[in-house]
Amino acid sequence: MRPAFYTIDRIEEGVAVLFDENETKKEIKTEELPKSAKEGDILSFDGKTYAIEKEKTDLAKVDLGERLSNLFKKEKKPMKTKAVRIYGENDLRLEEFELPEMKEDEILGHIISNTICMSSHKAAIQGGKHKRVPDDVAQNPVIIGHEFCGEIVKVGKKWEGKYKAGSKFSVQPAMNYKGSLAAPGYSYRYIGGNATYVIIPQEVMETNCLLEYSGDAFYFGSLAEPMSCIVGACHANYHHAAPGVYVHNMGIAEGGNCAYLGAAGPMGLGAIDYAVHCERKPGKIAVIDIDQSRLDRAASIVTVEEAKKNGVELVYLNTSGYEKPEEPLLALTGNKGYDDVFVYYPSKQLVETGDKILARDGCLNFFAGPTDPNFSAEFNFYNVHYASTHIVGTSGGNTDDMVESLEMMGSGKIDPSMMITHVGGLDAAAGTILNLPNIRAGKMLIYTNIKMPLCAITDFEKLGKTDPVFAELGKITKANNGIWCHEAEKYLLENAEAI
């Protein structure tokens, strides 16, 4: 007897809505679904049990987006999403709510992954006081999270010639639309990374900030945004073309000395990887931190040997034992100093150390965003006057930076997988964001359509003693030097419990 085939249209309130090959609707209890079933999966039914047809699901991915679009039209039932929203200071809530009907100049997206940024923590603790968060957030909460990747489900008429259902996408949140600071993940009620479905507003497309992503792993698309911040910071530094000439060369000094301070964390790792493999690279890179375990991990991932192969001398240095950390840093350059200094942690001491190690015409980039609006540090203005030292600050990349990140990841020049140390489901997002400064680790990766507590990759094997899903994830990541990968993502999405 030939089995019947169904597509899971949606899962809500204990009921799964299915459609067969003739688009006939059927509703079943969620207990009848396979444990890891999720919206969009194709199921077979032999008269007794339902089973996931993985091959059919993969083959139908593009067609599935178009089919869902038609089904939403036919049903004319409000589309629901699950999302984490900001209501005020330290007030994040995971809720299910209805999305408005999509307009002709909008796009419906299905979010798959979102990585957690310290900027989201700052927005969460500041609420409406944050520059990007609306003042009326208590009455009109916004979805939090801006490092996301997903699939297009339905395209509004205005954009049908440019985007298509079923394609993967990422978003550049720093749109600068008409000079506004408004950004997805901070300012909008119906778009943000910690959600299942979102309505992408027309300004995202108008500013060319909806970017097509052709890679296999969704988490790469999520990491493109933080990588674009790193790329943008390197492009923002500048130096005089020649003494006495009022022309500047943008970018880090090619073949020069470069220092990354407080940079053994997730963003620092990405920065080191980029600096070693980009076209305009320094000749020497010094990376300092006061946490030896973080330095050891960084050195095992972006190795001194790999840097040397790319023509870069790379040095990792723990400055916790130095009363004057500028001394060993300057010694590495023969007291010449550094052409480019990046401060990756908002510390007064680090900023002042960075100032002290600048070479003539040296540029200090204050990359780390402080939460204290009164944050300040001393800067040597004698050197500003006589040695042309200068300072810049960057708080994100632009669309070109994000495209460069996607291209470098796609070509294998950089691999931001090393930034990820923890993985969880949408139910773990709110707690992770609020507690982020207390989690001394790398990047937190959230898969928005599953239930899963936030777990360190290093704990997978231990958790696997009682959970077969973690056991398999432990095997996969162990074979990959303890680093998250596409194989791990694929397995998790196929086997985790749907939210």
Image: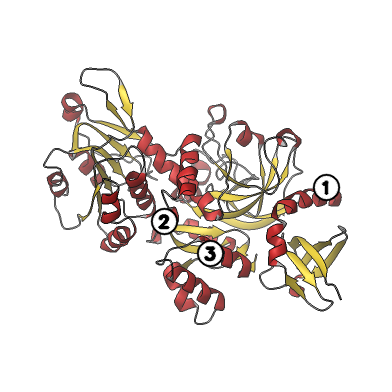
**Of marks 2 and 3, the one in the foreground:** 3
Q: Which mark is residue 419?
A: 2
Inspect the image, locate mark 3, and give the three-letter code of the amino acid beneath it. Answer: Glu
Q: Measuring 53% from the left and 43% from the top, which residue is drawn there?
A: 128
Distance from the alpha carbon under mark 1 to that under mark 2: 40 Å
Q: Measuring 31% from the left and 40% from the top, which residue is drawn there?
A: 281
In this picture, is 267 found above or below 358?
Answer: below
Q: Tell me the SS state at disc 1.
A: helix
Residue that extends furthest to the top in the rendered view of this protein: 245
Q: Which of the 4 image quarters holds residue 81? A: bottom right
Inspect the image, locate mark 1, and give the three-letter code of the amino acid beneath it. Answer: Lys
Q: Earlier in the sequence, mark 1 or mark 3?
A: 1
**Of marks 1 and 3, the one in the foreground:** 3
Inspect the image, locate mark 2, and give the three-letter code of the amino acid beneath it. Answer: Met
Q: Tell me the SS state at disc 2.
A: helix
What residue would you read off at disc 1?
A: 73
Q: Tell me the SS state at disc 3.
A: helix
What residue would you read off at disc 3?
A: 487
Task: Evaluate whether residue 322 shows in this view.
Answer: yes
In this picture, is 438 found above or below 411?
Answer: below
Q: Measuring 28% from the left and 62% from the top, which residue is drawn there?
A: 296
Q: Are marks 1 and 3 in contact (CB under 8 Å)?
A: no
